[in-house]
Amino acid sequence: MKRAAVLMALVALSACESNLSGHPSAKEVLTALDRPWIGRAGIEQQFFNDEAIEDAVLSGICTATPEWLEVAHRLFETSNAHLGEELASALAVALIRRPEAVLGKFEYRYVCSEPDDLPGACSVPHWRVAASDALQKIRDPALAVVKEKCAVDVARSVGLQSIQESK
């Protein structure tokens, strides 16, 4: 009897797996995050088990579309250190594409440092120059102080990309 109950529970849990496709959409990830028994922990587990899914999600976040920024926000809220670093790197790329949206949604200390190891779709040559240029386009007075703090962090930032470019 106990064995049957455990088996039924395992079947029920496996039916709740998110089973993200190899290249999930932001909507697919958000839906999985909202499902009971999956949520953020289930998504993180898929990241660790499937590099293609991780790369697809990080590449999506790099696009800086509102949906992907929401995915990043939801994952970033309670992420572990490893995932937090990867999300911060993807958001640093998103910063150059939609600086007001990124700085309006995330703390500058997480998104104003040069990105490190990211999928090729997120590659940005001369990130510091691109980030500085993007910050200059911010016109929202509510972001003025954050913009200046971010500019300082960008100028001081030295990530993997800068090391590789200097070789």
Image (cartoon, helix red, strand yellow):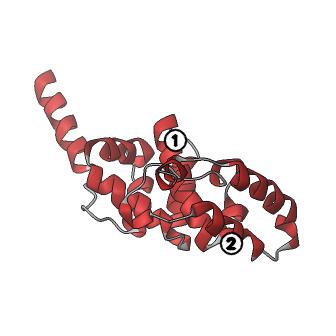
The relative height of residue 128 versus residue 25 in the rendered view (above or below) is: above
Element assignment for label 1? loop
The relative height of residue 82 versus residue 95 in the rendered view (above or below) is: above
What residue is drawn where x is 44% and y is 55%?
A: 34
Element assignment for label 2? helix
* Foreground pick, 83 / 131: 131
Q: Is residue 88 left or right of residue 56?
A: right
The relative height of residue 79 versus residue 151 in the rendered view (above or below) is: above
List x then y, in percent, for residue 49.
26, 42
Compare marks 2 and 1 and give the one earlier in the sequence: 1
Would you name the residue on which mark 2 appears?
A: 134
Question: Disc 2, disc 1: CB below 8 Å?
Answer: no
Q: Is residue 86 left or right of residue 32?
A: right
List x then y, in percent, for residue 15.
22, 50
Would you name the residue on which mark 1 appears?
A: 79
Foreground tag (2 vs 1): 2
List x then y, in percent, for residue 69.
55, 64
What residue is drawn where x is 39% and y is 53%?
A: 35
